[in-house]
Image: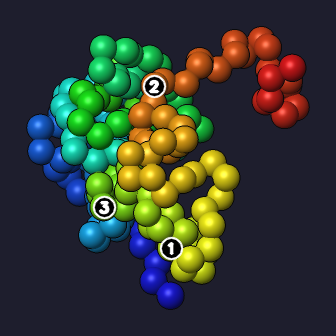
Amino acid sequence: MEIRRFGPGHCRREGPPGTLGVTGQVIHNDERGTIAELAFSASAMIPPHANPNTTYFVVVGGGGWVQVGEERARVAHGEAVVWPAGELHGAWTDGTEMRALVVEFTSEVGPDALVGGAYERLAGAPEGEAAPEDTVDDPRGAGRSDADRGRGSLAEPPPPRDRLHESTGEPW
């Protein structure tokens, strides 16, 4: 068993190239993709940029802002944003700290590659068995949802705090 430590006290001083006030560390990296932790200081930023891979930005603490294309929105812990391959995206904070896990799939195993039998292999279905109903093995991806193709947008904002149940924190 291998245990990888991350979180406070485990980040490198320097963040990813081009960032400001961001520290982080790679938790896992191989031909399938990368998982990294990022810690944003109170006024930190990943400038808008594009990436050839589909990436999930999962906020695990605090909150800040994200951008996908021209769309911008606030995010908080417990929310994830899809950064589609090839599309401009970024993140920043404006007076609060934020921690996020970044999960980046290489194009060979990302949502766009889950056709032609790859889905079955990754999902554990024996070779030759049919794909689940929501997928097809058409190389153009016909019948697949935008989320399966790595296309997305920002989620609807959470309900106001006064609309959350006191004991569970869930919406009424």
Mark 2 is on which residue type?
Answer: Ser
Q: Is residue 18 above or below residue 10?
A: above
Residue 159 is marked as: none
Q: Residue furthest bottom?
A: 1
Given contact means CB atoms under 8 Å apart, are the residues at marks 3 and 1 in contact? no
10 Å neighbourhood of mark 1: few (<14), some, or many (≥20)? some
Q: Which residue is mark 1?
A: 121
Q: Is residue 47 visible?
A: yes
Q: How far from the left and from the top, in percent, is residue 13?
A: 20, 52
Residue at the image position 35 percent from the left and 36 percent from the top: 84
Give the residue type that dot 1 points to.
Arg
Q: Check the picture and name the quadrant holding the C terminus.
A: top right
Query: Which marked residue is nearer to the observer: mark 2 or mark 1?
Result: 1
Relative vertical location of residue 71 with respect to residue 1 in this rendering, above or below: above
Which residue has dot 3 on it? 108
Point out the residue furthest to the left here: 18
**Residue shown at 42% from the left, 41% from the top:** 150
Residue 107 higher or lower than 164, as above or below: below
Task: Determine whether the residue tagged by mark 2 lies in a helix, strand or loop.
Answer: loop
Which three-letter amino acid code belongs to the residue tagged 3? Glu
What is the secondary structure assignment of the residue under circle 3?
loop
How far apart are the alpha carbons under marks 3 and 1? 13 Å
Q: Is residue 21 visible?
A: no
